Amino acid sequence: MKISDVVFKTYEEVEKMERFDLKSMPKKAKWYLQVLAWGLSIPETFIRKVKITKVNMDKVKGPYVLLCNHNSFFDFKVATRAFFPRRANYVVAVDGFINREKLMRNVGCIGKRKFVADPSIVKQLKHSLEVNKSIAVIYPEARYSLIGTTAILPDSLGKLVKMFKYPVVTLISHGHHLHQPVWNFKKRKVPVKSVMTYLLSTEDLEKLSVDEINSRIKTSFYYNDYEYQANNNIKIKGNDRAVNLEKVLYKCPHCKNEKSMHSENNKLYCSNCKHEYHVDEYNRLNESTGNTIFNFIPDWYEWQRKEVANEIEKGSYNLEIDVYVDSLPNSTGFYRLGKGKLIHNQEGFKLTAKFQDHDFEITKPVLSNYGVHVEFEYFGKGDCISFSTAKDSYYLFPVNKDVSVTKIHFAVEELYKIKTKKSTSQ
């Protein structure tokens, strides 16, 4: 079936379905499929005039762990070119296997459910490095960056790479968000570049603490596509620079309304207080009457984060909404179970529903999720968030279209930060 199809199944029917295999060892990419992958990826990187700068990569011998930032599907194509002609095993979310699991496994992909602990991934990555002698490719942000800036990285990353004892390389791409923003979808002609850096040697991993390793990784992962655009005077022409920008800039900085932001062509405006911003060719924001509060898109975005953090600190943050619940038990596709109620507050997530005669409930404590997966207009079904259990992934579509999934994304991250800080200080 098509991913865009809404297919209804009963809870009992879904429960009887075979689960996605999260434990099988990754295959070494078959040579003919590897050639196909090169053919599908590398030409586009030359058409887009991708510049890849390699730092100390001549010193890397044998398999290594490659950590990449994540802004669009184009990331995979650039990575394929960056380590050409080497082969790799990629960690890919289960939804990436829909309708093509056999192909994905044969090109070396490792399936994983996002934002859920899975001990099998350690064995699979070790198999990739030690048995397949392949590059182990990880996108530690675990989803596309919503605004072209560094997303939160898991604290477990340092422990993971230290355990492997293989060199660590980073591939940080600049301009990929501008090329195809996750909230806009349309591809734009933007010059892009990537930097591939030999970051940590086996000796470094042995002598450095986990905290020191995490610090080096987080420092190397800094990127900001709007800053990159400004520094390189990159113009983006066209009449759609603001289209869907309200998906990420959902709160008006003038009247503080969270449900009144709209976009049209190169204009972002509030229907409540009538303030209107023009997005110019450099993605700078200018309010029509000269009353500009935010000139830089990431500044507006981060202001919203602080607003959510303030709500949490005051104890006023509380979300209770109706959602459509889609289940992803395996790679055959999504199955709609029906409607449920999603609560998100200081305790974390609680999803409840009654599917036929079955009472359904999932709780996700704050410390179980450092982030949440967000999609905008996911295959025409609407905005959604998703979280997983060990045997299923649930995509939750707010019935009320005014609900901002970006705000939920902020709340998950800020609750995790606050809870972590409190737990470590005790």
Image (tube, rainbow, N blue to C red):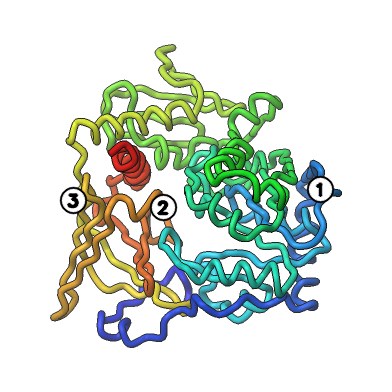
Is residue 18 shown to the viewer in this render? yes
Identify the amino acid type marked 1. Answer: Met
Q: Is residue 151 left or right of residue 413?
A: right
Q: Which residue was labeled with disc 3? A: 320
Residue 10 location (% of width, % of height): 26, 81
- What is the C-alpha distance between the residues marked 1 and 3? 50 Å
Q: Quadrant of the C terminus?
A: top left
**Mark 1 and mark 3 residues within 8 Å of each other at the beta carbon:** no
Residue plotted at (79% across, 50% down): 47
Q: Is residue 182 left or right of residue 164?
A: left
Point out the frontmost of discs 2 and 1: 1
Q: Which residue was labeled with disc 2? A: 374
Label 2: element kind? strand
**Which numbered marker is on residue 57?**
1
Residue 34 location (% of width, % of height): 76, 72
Crowd band around label 2 with a 10 angstrom C-alpha radius: few (<14), some (14–19), many (20+): many
Residue plotted at (30% across, 86% down): 13
Looking at the image, residue 322 lies above or below residue 186: below
Is residue 410 shown to the viewer in this render? no
**Mark 2 and mark 3 residues within 8 Å of each other at the beta carbon:** no
- What is the C-alpha distance between the residues marked 2 and 3? 17 Å
Residue plotted at (60% across, 78% down): 25
Res 79 quadrant in image: bottom right
